[in-house]
Amino acid sequence: MPYPRSQCDENAAYLASAAAINPAAVPLHYDPRAWPDNSGAIEVRQGKNMSLAHDVPPHTAATKLRHDWTRAEVHALFALPFPDLMFRAAQTHRENFDPAEVQISTLLSIKTGGCPEDCAYCPQAAQYDTGVKAEKLMAVEAVLAEARAAKASGASRFCMGAAWRSPKDRDLDSVCAMVEGVKALGLETCATLGMLTREQAAQLKASGLDYYNHNLDTSPEYYDAIITTRTYQDRLDTLDTVRDAGIHVCCGGIVGMGEGLEDRVGMIATLASLPVHPESVPINMLVQVEGTPLATGATKTPKLDPLDFVRTIAVARITMPASVVRLSAGREDMSEETQALCFLAGANSIFYGPKLLTTPNPGRDRDMRLLDKLGLRPME
Ligand code: SAM
Ligand code: DTB
Ligand code: SF4
């Protein structure tokens, strides 16, 4: 049985509204009326029992940004039947982005290991025996050489990470020189250096920093179980400082740390209720590193169901519709199918290159083959 006419009209209205926001986001083949055999195609889709939008309100208007997401609403999104959640996330994605484009960032650890903080997931905390050696801050020229290589291999953003609680002023001068140099190569710049003062944020902004990564990592309630050397409020304060300095915010978290569904709800509700949504939202799957409390001995964390990770991406996409959602750490051990579901759920950024900060990431060839297979292309 073909679609009832009204359903077809609702789809057309949605497509028209999405096209009005971003024409590139609605390629021709998304318009059922443009299919060579309209009724036949629709019959096949019905025949496969696709539950297209029957219980989801039709999209007739552009997505509004909301900053008043309640936990109950976020919970309700997580609780949707998987196909409905994916459908809503994909709709939201198309309204705001070209779903075939993926933003490509490359990471470099500019100061590795020896960190005084006790984040239970992190191989760089000095107090865990993980085999990561403490190193000094890299020289500016060495960082720029890495940035040139990242640009040559297709990255549009270069993200510099340091294992600090907060930077010393002398170190910040060097980081600012790195930011200036990377920016001069025509790359977007991102840094993650721990807590910042207002003066430090202003100095980074003046040197050309585009993004600052500072994750909330989990819910306020679960934070103490993961980190005792700082508070959730410390994190929120630095996010304010960064925002006030006029730097774009990159803020997300980690799933698979033994948290419950309510913690994933709490994390997304907190992110989506910030006065301005983070422009970039990295969702990391915990990389279990031997020697960290979350990966070792009796406390070893059970692996999260990959579909719960996909759900987290989808809920981030729906609640922060205009933000770039990054499928971040954890891809090395993730199947192609799970990654494909993440892209379908609205992820539109990855870290590209064989290393994250200290742990492996898929090689460039493997990632290019995957993007090719899925018909995805790097965002300009
Ligand atoms: N020291 C700074 C800080 O904590 O903000 C910057 C670097 S820190 C490594 C950046 C982020 O990496 C953390 O907030 C966390 O979200 C992520 N991360 C660290 N270790 C991870 C792991 N084992 N698995 C997944 N994500 C991890
Ligand atoms: C983010 O959210 N994930 C990246 C980046 N921001 C700095 C870091 C992932 C680190 C994974 C563990 C490691 O390689 O040390
Ligand atoms: Fe240090 Fe950052 Fe690792 Fe925490 S996540 S131990 S602050 S490097």
Image: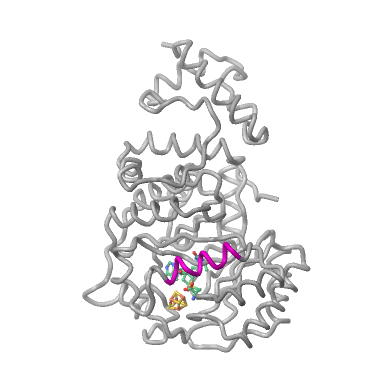
Give above or below for 104 relative to 322.
below
Q: Nearer the viewer, residue 53 or 335?
A: 53
x, y percentage for residue 118?
37, 80
**Residue at x 35% of width, y 41% of height:** 77
x, y percentage for residue 228?
33, 77
Direction from residue 240 to residue 118 in the image, left or right: left
x, y percentage for residue 243?
57, 62
Residue 46 lies in what quarter of the image? top left
Q: Nearer the viewer, residue 120 or 270?
A: 270
Q: Nearer the viewer, residue 59 or 346?
A: 59
Give above or below for 347 relative to 171.
above
| Ligand 3 in which quarter | bottom left
**Residue at x 28% of width, y 71% of height:** 225
x, y percentage for residue 214?
50, 67
Which region is colored magenta?
A: 234-244
Direction from residue 28 to residue 280 in the image, left or right: left
Direction from residue 331 to residue 99 in the image, left or right: right
Direction from residue 33 to residue 214 in the image, left or right: left
Give above or below for 252 relative to 355.
above
Give the main secondary structure, helix, strand or loop, of the magenta stretch. Answer: helix
Is residue 73 covered in magenta? no
